[in-house]
Amino acid sequence: MTRKEILDSLLRFNAPLDSLRELLDAFPWDSEPEVVMTLGDAKIVVEKFQAGTISASEIARWAEMIE
């Protein structure tokens, strides 16, 4: 997976956060940003929360990761 693909997956919460963190750790932190979060990305995550597929603590951790 490329860094962009990993970041896209993170923005949409398409994989477990631990897995995404492990994949991202292979890249330097000072890498240039490759994606931009959209309102649609946020909506996807909120809908997952409303459906009960992710918890409030997971959303908090997700938000910290996309920071």
Image: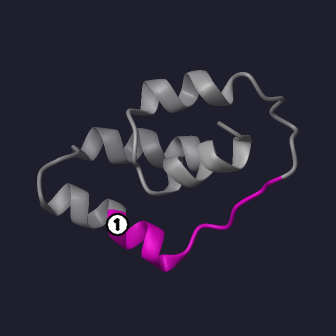
| Residues rendered magenta in the picture | 33-44
Residue 33 visible to an observer of this rendering: yes
In the rendered picture of this protein, how many numbered marks are placed on residues?
A: 1
Residue 67 visible to an observer of this rendering: no
Confirm whether the magenta stretch covers residue 38. Answer: yes
Nearest to the observer: residue 1 or residue 65: 1
Residue 37: x %, y % from top left:
59, 67
Please say if 34 is above or below 3.
below
Left or right: where 5 falls relative to 50: right
Q: Residue at x 84, y 29 (%)?
A: 28
Q: Residue at x 46, y 68 (%)?
A: 41
Quarter residue 2 falls in: top right
Residue 22: x %, y % from top left:
58, 21
Quarter residue 61 falls in: top left
Amino acid type at circle 1 is Ile
Q: Quadrant of the N terminus?
A: top right
Other-residue count near label 1 (Cα within 10 Å), few / some / many at <14 / 14–19 / ≥20: some
SS class, disc 1: helix
Left or right: where 64 falls relative to 7: left
Please say if 12 is above or below 61.
below
Q: Residue at x 23, y 66 (%)?
A: 47
Nearest to the observer: residue 16 or residue 42: 16
Residue on which disc 1 sits: 44
Nearest to the observer: residue 61 or residue 42: 42
